[in-house]
Amino acid sequence: MLPLHDILVEQFKSEFGEDLLHCEIRNRPEGVKRPRDQRSLWLTFHRRHFHMAVTFLSRFGAPHISCPMASREYEDRIDLIYPFTIYGGTGNYMELPVIITAQVPRDDLRIRTVTDIVPGILFMERETREMLGIDIEDIPDERRLFTPGNLPPEMKPMLETYRGAGRGGGR
Amino acid sequence: MSKSTSTFPLSIGPTHPAFKEPVKFSFEVDGEKIVRTDMDFGYTHRGIEHVARERNFIQVIYLLERICGICSVSHPMAYCLAVENAAGIEVPPRAKYVRTIIGELERLHSHLLWTGVAAHEIGFDTLFLHTWDIREKVMDCLELLTGNRVNYAMLTIGGVRRDIAPEHYGILEETLDYYRELYNRTREILLEDLTVQMRCRDIGVLTYEDAVALCAVGPTARASGLPKDVRIDYPCNAYPDIEWLRPASPRDIGKEPRGDVFDRMIVRVLEMKQSVEIVGFCLDNMPDGEIVVESKAIKLINQLKKVKGDGLGRYEAPRGEVAHFDILDEREGPAQIKVKAPTYSNAAAWAVMFNGAEIADIPIIAASIDPCIACADRMTVIKNGCGGLSFTAEELHRLSVEKQKRIKATCGNS
């Protein structure tokens, strides 16, 4: 029988075909006396297939969102990276991170909410909205989460274009 | 006289004596009963994620230690794991064990701290003083091993900065014995005292279903019967070697999880014992060898500067899952880091816990997730053009010196 991550990959490939833009399994050994492989699954979709992908993932178990969405910026698009995990809480080393990247066109910064599938993602979507200026369609709460009310609406602190004039260590 | 059916708004915070950190709750109350809850964050602004983009890989470790004073191992751990994952760095076996020991000592002192806070919130100050008194032993032990009570500066990318020396083993064993001897008495006070049960049983309930939907983590999730624990679900460091390790649950003492404040206390009490035994396991099985892959910071930075990729680092902090997502882009430091603290996940569950509770229970329900607002708030940048709220480091230093002078002058005149 195939391991769970391989089954998941096969299912995603069969369901999405060419709409699955990139698919990768990463392995990393952990432990010393009882080494175990830690696996993670990395998937990339265009934003129009993102909601369907998360819906599909939820058929295998309740997705848990592990971290607010990171972003990679390109000339024509912003990649939003959603680090989900599934099979957690089974208590038997079975958890699998499924990191889904959604490609959002730079000239139309919007993506559909997934709070209908993962209600716990609401704060993170609110953060993405205020920090990156990506409109989260149908989000149930449009308020800012962290930034103060007097921050000008055009100011999106985590966009590369907003990067401050620091000392440049990370550059 | 007819009973009123109208409700009233009740705002608590952002700064309030019942809360250790600033967060604003807006309740809708019907008499003493809470019928609706809303929360407002962002009062602990430090812009850490933004600042991290301007620092090199090593500087970021010490910056992230300061996200939270209590979790000063957890955040650097998740960050180092994320960078190691992105760069394919294999941590030496001995470093994995040292990391586990420091992390579990942190969990022990954090849970003891929380127990004291919880006791104080229910008016049981004798218990508060008792737990904070016995916490000192593990704080002393951490100071001995690392040089600090908090902000230990123990971790680095690819290992740890200091080894556990042979002369430390005896002191560590003595510390473990101290807690083993105290455990039964402490457990009896916390879990069998009627006062604690009367204030915590069936208060602030989070059901299993809500815990799953709202992505609850840590003791908060485990108390609701959701056995999520990164140490078991997705183990790193020495955790895969510990065969007997299981997520703590009220079921371990024969009680079906109810997801209330008392169950959260049960889980943390059980985890204190677990931490002691994990440290004991690591001392008994400590591998020999190196503690770091590359001890020269400049050389390490130059290696990481060639890496283009991303990594997810996850670690079970005392309050639950800490996750860092790091993007490496051939720079001297991370191109981007995203940080998720356990309170960020568990805060959404507050609304469910408060609804139906009474006003008097607000402090203990708020405390029951062991909140760390500084962790959750880690990010907000305020720059020029929004009301002049921007300060440079020099300005902040000057303000601090001026304030100290004012205080000294005032004290000197009194």
Image (tube, rainbow, N blue to C red):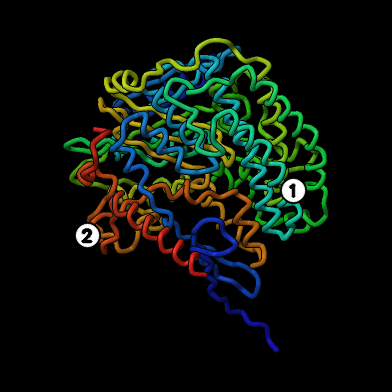
Going by the image, does B176 lie left or right of B61? right
Crowding at label 2, few (<14), some or many (≥20) Cα neighbours within 10 Å?
few
Residue for badge 2: B385
Q: Residues within 10 Å of mark 1 (few under 14, many from 20)?
A: some
Q: Position of residue A156 (x, y in %)?
A: 26, 50
Q: Is residue B335 visible?
A: yes
In front here: B382 or B173? B173
Q: Residue B128: x, y in percent?
A: 71, 52
Image coordinates of residue B79 in percent, x first then y, are: 43, 31
- Helix or strand or loop: what does disc 2 sit on? loop
Residue B85 spot, x, y in % from top left: 41, 23
First reached walking from the N terminus: tag 2 or tag 1: 1
Identified at 32% across, 42% down, the residue is: B51
Q: Amino acid at mark 1?
A: His
Identify the residue at image location x=78%, y=42%: B187
Q: Which mark is residue A41?
A: none
Picture quarter with the N terminus of chain B:
bottom right
Nearest the viewer among A4 and B42 is B42
- From the viewer's perspective, tell me whether residue B329 is left or right of residue A148: left
**Label 1: chain?**
B
Image side of residue B315 versus residue A163, left or right: right
Q: Secondary structure at mark 1?
A: helix
Q: Is residue B390 above or below residue A75?
A: below
Quadrant in which residue B340 is drawn: top left
Q: Nearer the viewer, residue A138 or B288?
A: B288
Looking at numbered disc 2 in the image, what kind of residue is underneath it? Gly
Q: Chain of mark 2?
A: B
On the question of residue A60 being in view, the answer is no
The residue under label 1 is B130
The alpha-carbon separation of the residues under discs 2 and 1 comes to: 50 Å
